[in-house]
Image (cartoon, rainbow, N blue to C red):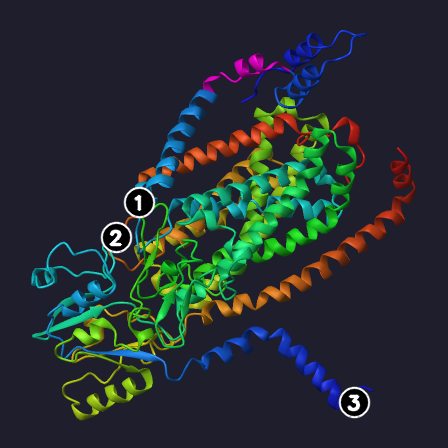
Amino acid sequence: MNEYPTEYVKKQYVENEITPGREETGAEIISNWLSEKFFMGLTLREYLKTLITPLNFVAGIIVAVGMFLIFQRFLFGLETVTEASNEQPWGLFLSWGLFSGVPFSASGFVIGTAVYIFGLKKYQPIVKNAILLGFLGYLFAVIFLMIDLGRPWRIYYPMFISFGTASVMFLVAWHVALYLSVQFLEFAPSTLAWLGWKNVRKIAVSMTLALTIFGVMLSTLHQSALSAMFLLAPGKLHPLWYTSYLPWLAFISSIGGALSLVIVVTKLTQVFMKNRADSHYLSNLDDITISLGRAAAFVLFTYVGLRLISVIHEGSWKYLNSPFGYWFLVEILILGIVPFLFLYGVQKKNVRLVQYSAALTMLGIVMNRFNISLIAFNWKLPDRGLFYWKEVLVVMAVVTIEILVYRWVVNRMPVLRQHPDYIGDEH
Amino acid sequence: MVTRRNFLKIGGSLIALSVAGSSIVKASEDFEGNPDRFGMLSDMTRCIGCRRCEAACNKSNKLPPPKTSFEDTSVFEKKRKPYVADVQAYTAVNRYEVEGKTVFRKVQCMHCDEPACASACPVGALKKSPEGPVVWNDKVCIGCRYCIIACPFYVPAFEYSSAFDPKIQKCFMCYQQRIAKGLVPACAEACPVEAITFGKRSDLIKQAWLRIWDNPDKYIDHIYGEKEAGGTGWLYISGVPFSKLDFQMDVGTTSYPKYTKDFLSMVNLTLVSWPALLGGFYLASHKSHTDQDGKSDEEGDKQ
């Protein structure tokens, strides 16, 4: 995934150096600035050449197909790319983009709280990455929502035009909008360090604590609200998933999901983005992974405990011996085994096992959100389509764009490393 | 001065605040809608399946012409929903053979007293009008389709084929074109056998019970909609069990907005508790931090 080796960059920097004793022209200043900030120190042509790689080629095809379908959707209606069902109005776009995407995006507030509020400096190396992942997760959740909304040009209506205060979705709309802004500001210190705007950055850094607390407030509510939306459909959601505990289960599992995402992405950056990271980041990762695994084990034990209690509380045991019951057992088995795997991995200091457990946890949480919003929803209806194959292509394209944006940012901004000018003022 | 009485008052209000959720929910059980709101009574022992209500509905709402004529009874061979994908109809009549009898059931929006769709709508586009119909505001709808998720009767439908002006479609009880002008909804007017009666909901319930009491052998002892989902504007009486006519028997008698009220009442509590808790944690950890290595911190600042 690397765009080119580091030595190459250094060489290019030297070659592009302005001959001393001559004043730069305006055009040169601009082209140098563009080269430094956007083209990784290369000229535009050289930069474009570095983009031609097999992986980028595959990504390009996926994005092109997806963009074509999205184009179609906006010109000819949702019918062209979705199941267009009046029984199952929400499909993959929301099940994946919103209901699965948002819980993992809790990474920003989970690690942010640990570092900025509890003062756990140990997690300092990964906090910027966690916030970036959170921000992008929310940004792309909104993008998925824009694709799915019937009238996306009115997305701001719940905020400014008309207020449905009795609606859980009204709450979600407000909180996702606010939290997206909060995460943008939380990540601003890295962006501003990249741009070199030192004074503005100082203001951004000084807001960190307030933003983090605000982020926790917003996250608690909308993480839980996403599942609470289904409280309104007691007859439609299968009793093994419908429980009055839904909001709190969603909140707790989002913390477990966020920890798992951070563990998995940390591993991926170690492999694919190594030349964008500094030793401060790389040398601490194993230790951090073990600690995150310990936290994840604790959170997931709580989750699974509460989940089992919810089944007893609602008296839905009787459904266990049915197809949906078996499907429920698969989900609970995955989420039930991961805390033990985490714990074992932590005890044996087996970083790899912790990483695999994290990946398995992510699978379990995606399953859980898919079950609530799609699979176990409308369980009584005899024949129903869950989603249309074109939805899969759109989801793949948007996820690919998300990864490309992430790579673009990490390649340029100090995310996996500390910016040399700002070491020590990271709060 | 804090007297015992005042103390109890303060304590009481604090407890009230902390259980605000349940008290709001209690309030919702006594629905305070317009007592004169309208409803419809559908007497399924009278319906002959002529489909004139469907035709009248189509005309009154200026809906596109149907695939086959409204006199065609072959449509009864399949169970139709008022909306499947983009079939443009606000209502449909289905035929059932139950206990040797042929029974027809008209399907359309139930016009709940406390609609799930209205409490789902993030922009308040769907509302229970004082007159009774559940209406929809084209000007604010964002097309999120949470109303479709929420409706226990599978009524609202969305125009998936429209990219620039997709509408939520359902029966509006002819609110704008007839009720607002003092006219009876088109289907009730068109019915040749008075199987559909339009009137004040409270009157209709009395009328329905009178019919049941006068002919206890003819009717089932139940008005569907009197209590279902907290009460609906559309009421049905039948000679055969409702469960055999595809009526939703799992909707219960709780009004749907109640299911999310508990959660929504937690919002303020959370907004207040977190800053207090986390601010406290921060101050506590910050203090002990400077106590332990205050010096090195100062040095760090100088750099």
The magenta-colored residue range is A42-55
Q: CA distance from mark 3 to mark 1?
A: 68 Å
Left or right, A404 with respect to B232, comes to right
Same chain letter for marks 2 and 1 = no
On screen, residue B190 above or below A168: below
Count of numbered marks: 3
Q: Are marks 2 and 1 in contact (CB under 8 Å)?
A: yes
- Identify the secondary structure beneath mark 2: loop
x then y, percent, for residue B151 = 36, 64
x then y, percent, for residue A222 = 55, 55
Kind of residue sitting beneath label 3: Thr
x then y, percent, for residue A175 = 57, 54
Residue under the point 67% across and 53% down: A214
Magenta includes B164?
A: no
User: What chain is tagged by disc 3?
Assistant: B
Left or right, B38 with respect to B55, comes to right
Kind of residue sitting beneath label 2: Asp
Residue under the point 56% across and 36% down: A264
Same chain letter for marks 3 and 2 = yes
Label 3 or label 2, whichever comes before in sequence order: 3
User: What chain is tagged by disc 2?
Assistant: B
- A29 or A243: nearer the viewer: A29
- Identify the secondary structure beneath mark 1: helix
- Identify the secondary structure beneath mark 3: loop
Magenta portion: prevailing SS class: helix
Kind of residue sitting beneath label 1: Glu
The residue indicated by pointer 2 is B86
Q: Which mark is residue B3?
A: 3
The residue indicated by pointer 1 is A79
Q: Residues within 10 Å of mark 3 (few under 14, many from 20)?
A: few
Query: Can residue A238 be seen here?
Result: yes
Magenta includes A54?
A: yes
